[in-house]
Image (cartoon, helix red, strand yellow):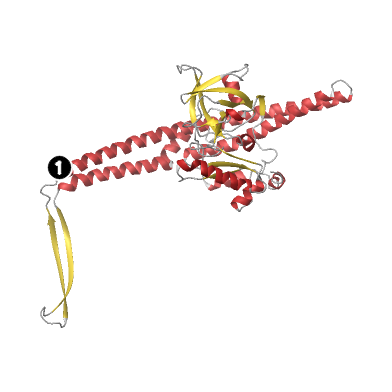
């Protein structure tokens, strides 16, 4: 999967831009699918909003990501339908601001289970961004744009909104196909490696979230930059206060001139050293206004620093909870995977004795595959959660990435990279 992102174009020319890009992608060999979208997984969020279930906004459901895409987005994202249906051609409508007006949506299984546990989500409605969304289908998986970095409580709290490419949907293009990515970028796509067998997660160290918060407050680059900005603003206040005071400076001048100004001839060098006293007479009003402006700028810097500190604290605490919870998720997934393996072995043994049918064996194989997949995803989410926690605390370094590489199977990427 690859992304092309264009900027700086005239919104009035968005239709022509989309047509040119789509026409160019049609000529690239190996493209399995492409579409015009508003954002992509692990990219910048473009549409994120809180969801309610009524017009009065009394029943809040949470903050979710809204993926908006044209008719090719379903194939490009690789969406798999579990219930309901995909949008029909006439349900792709024009985007007004962030989304079309009252559009149908596809909702992920995780989000549907959160909104309507034990109920059929197809036909249900949600409200956000001053419009109503009607659920027409349930999809298996679609990750939020920035897992662990936003306000979504689950990495699959997303919906897909069908729309027509145009003025408000242009500039971001999703491409599906490994050979196509290599042909467009000129570089082969990197192969994915799996985690080593026997990987055992380790929770955040230190285990106290307060220690992570204290470290972030002391060393986070954003906080340090904000503190420096406040100190600079204070220095500008002092400079503004001194603007109406007399200043004493040292002046030095050098001049080359002829000895006789009337006739050309030998030249002499004249040097002058002196003290220069400057006394402002009518600069008081301007100096006072500059002092007030500098004071307001200092107050704004202090407020921004406090907002940054609160944001860092909130993000560190949330990432610590996610990292700590990922350890429990792995334990639960390991137990489920082991149970699924034993159930599959028992079903196969029973099938040899003639008790379970072949359908039971196939169902057990499917259940075991899903359990193993969930275990693998839980392990990878733990690795990402630990990196996001260190990033939130301002302590992520190249050594952390090296340690992650040490957890990967060195040759698994070759096998995984053989197919698109």
Residue lying farthest right? Answer: 353
In the foreground, 184 or 203: 184
Identify the residue shown where x is 53% and y is 21%.
Answer: 126
Quadrant position of residue 291: top left
Asked if 327 appears above or below 244 in the picture, the reply is above
**Tally of numbered tags:** 1
Judged left or right of residue 263, residue 217 is right
Residue 375 picture quarter: top right
Quarter of the image with the C terminus in it: top right
Question: Picture coordinates of residue 106 (x, y %)?
Answer: 60, 27
Residue 191 in view, yes or no:
no
Q: Nearer the viewer, residue 411 or 94?
A: 94
Closer to the camera in the image, 44 or 303: 44
**Percent of width and height locating residue 98:** 48, 32
The residue beneath circle 1 is 285
Would residue 274 be seen by someone viewing this image from the given angle? yes
| Other residues around mark 1 within 10 Å, as few (<14) / some (14–19) / many (≥20) | few
């Amino acid at each position: 999967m690859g992304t092309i992102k264009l900027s700086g174009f005239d919104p009035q020319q968005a239709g022509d831009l989309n047509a040119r890009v789509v026409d160019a992608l049609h000529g690239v060999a190996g493209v399995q699918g492409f579409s015009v979208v508003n954002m992509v997984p692990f990219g910048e969020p473009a549409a994120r909003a809180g969801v309610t279930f009524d017009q009065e906004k009394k029943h809040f459901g949470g903050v979710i990501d809204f993926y908006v895409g044209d008719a090719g987005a379903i194939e490009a994202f690789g969406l798999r339908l579990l219930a309901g249906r995909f949008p029909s051609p006439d349900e792709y409508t024009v985007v007004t601001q962030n989304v079309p007006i009252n559009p149908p949506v596809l909702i992920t299984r995780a989000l549907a289970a959160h909104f309507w546990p034990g109920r059929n989500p197809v036909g249900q409605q949600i409200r956000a961004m001053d419009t109503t969304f009607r659920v027409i289908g349930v999809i298996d998986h679609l990750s939020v744009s920035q897992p662990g970095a936003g306000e979504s409580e689950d990495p699959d709290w997303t919906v897909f909104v069908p729309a027509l490419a145009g003025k408000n949907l242009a500039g971001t293009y999703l491409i599906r196909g490994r050979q196509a990515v290599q042909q467009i970028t000129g570089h082969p796509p990197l192969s994915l490696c799996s985690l080593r067998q026997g990987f055992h997660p380790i929770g955040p160290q230190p285990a106290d979230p307060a220690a992570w918060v204290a470290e972030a407050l002391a060393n986070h680059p954003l906080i340090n930059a904000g503190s420096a900005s406040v100190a600079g603003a204070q220095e500008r206040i002092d400079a503004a206060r001194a603007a109406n005071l007399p200043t004493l400076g040292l002046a030095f001048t050098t001049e080359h001139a002829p000895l006789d100004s009337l006739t050309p001839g030998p030249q002499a060098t004249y040097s002058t050293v002196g003290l220069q006293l400057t006394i402002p007479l009518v600069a008081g009003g301007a100096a006072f206004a500059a002092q007030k402006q500098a004071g307001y700028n200092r107050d704004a810097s202090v407020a921004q620093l406090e907002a940054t500190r609160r944001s860092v604290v909130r993000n560190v605490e949330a990432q610590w909870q996610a990292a700590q919870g990922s350890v429990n998720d792995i334990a639960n997934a390991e137990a489920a995977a082991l149970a699924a393996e034993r159930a599959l072995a028992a079903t196969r043994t029973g099938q040899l004795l003639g008790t379970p049918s072949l359908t039971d064996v196939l169902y057990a194989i499917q259940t075991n595959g899903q359990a193993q997949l969930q275990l693998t995803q839980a392990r990878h989410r733990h690795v990402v959660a630990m990196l996001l926690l260190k990033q939130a605390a301002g302590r992520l370094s190249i050594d952390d990435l090296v340690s992650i590489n040490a957890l990967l199977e060195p040759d698994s990427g070759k096998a995984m990279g053989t197919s698109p």
